[in-house]
Amino acid sequence: MRPSPPLIPVANPAAQLESHGILVREAIERFLASGQYILGPEVKTLEKEFAAFLGASFCIGVANGTDALALALRATGISPGDEVITVSHSAVASVAGIEQINAVPVFADIDPASRCLNPAVIERLLSPKTKAIVVVHIYGQPAAMDEIVSIARRHGLKVVEDCAQAHGAELHGRKVGTWGDAAAFSFYPTKNLGAFGDGGAVVTNLAEVAEQIRILREYGWKERYISSIAGFNSRLDELQAAVLRTKLPSLAGDNVRRREIATAYCEAIDPAKLTPPKAVPGTLHAMHLFVVESVERAALRDFMRAAGVGTALHYPQPIHLQPAYAGRIRGGNDLRETESLYRQILTLPMFPELTDDQVETVCDALRRWCSAS
Ligand SMILES: Cc1ncc(COP(=O)(O)O)c(C=O)c1O
């Protein structure tokens, strides 16, 4: 029996390396020759360039996106025991970042159209301990930041955006990451802007928050070796910053290509047979992940595999049903939309280096599934 060809992967960071190969190798040479390996000139320049890309005042490079969330919360004044409203339909990191500073997550349900936090449920979750909201722009879809920020302001809550999946996404022409008090980005290799290792950043328009993060990311040092407050070790490497700087100029174009691929997939889908991501007015999707919904998910997954198309689940279980969190997080018993969505979601291949032939293979499989079902 002939071995079947490899499936089209859902993500492919190696293809990014291929497409940026020469520039990445030049950046690595520059890094090797520099003699500075952590928090040096590459990090400083990346911070300026990424802030400029977003239209934000400050960017501070840190070790990963989970730390970025923890640091953003700490620097905006969230303390142990404070409650932070967020969603269960996310990567577990959204909650891990909250618990890293001993704050207390509280779960809010999602809006089924955007699959992001539903602003309409926030007020019924408030308690005297509520101090912040972590808003996740899941899959690259901007959440309703205008409504969420105005509710937060009414109740004196801080807003931290989890932009790990949404580099370059926009709401009403303004980039996500610039709406709240601070925002966390991940540069995990598969992200829209990915390093070749771990990396992250906090972005803010507030000078005092930026200053706090700079201090907190390195042991609370204001002055070298003297901790003014108890901090973290969450530094970004020069190597990762150098790689990210070579890729940043392509991010906007890569996102355009992602959206083109999404348009092709949507055109191939009959929405009566398979639910594509919904278009949310006023938003520009970063298309980190292309996620469809089907009540026949297992069969669809098998069908795709037979057609040579890889799939994944983001995520197989919402956070409140995972063993580490089940039954212990307030709000977890009232997540109807979250619980109905997760059983139906399926992630299809989505990365800018997908060839036209690969896109056509996915489209052909989608058309065949929709006409047969
Ligand atoms: C929504 C979300 N938040 C936070 C993170 C955390 O990022 P990192 O893996 O860099 O810690 C990720 C990435 O895995 C993510 O997808």
Image (spheres, helix red, strand yellow):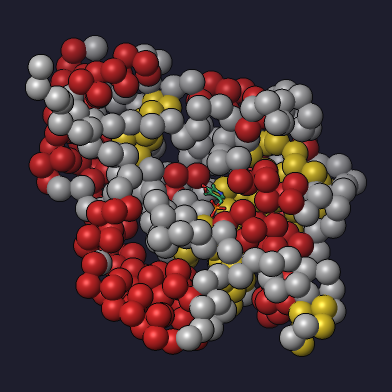
Where is residue 53 shown, x and y percent of the image? 43, 73
Residue lying furthest right in this view? 128
Where is residue 371 shown, x and y percent of the image? 17, 17
Quarter of the rendering containing residue 333: top right
Which quadrant does the C terminus fall into? Answer: top left
Residue found at x 19% / y 28%: 308
| Above or below, 326 relative to 156 | above
Where is residue 133 shown, x and y percent of the image? 70, 50
Residue found at x 75% / y 42%: 105
Nearer to us in this view, 108 or 164:
164
Quarter of the rendering containing residue 86: top right
| Above or below, 311 relative to 356 | above
Nearer to us in this view, 43 or 128:
43
**Residue 191 seen by the camera:** yes
Q: From the viewer's perspective, is 235 left or right of 257?
A: right
Residue found at x 16% / y 20%: 368
Quarter of the rendering containing residue 359: top left
| Above or below, 360 relative to 22 | above
Residue found at x 44% / y 22%: 344
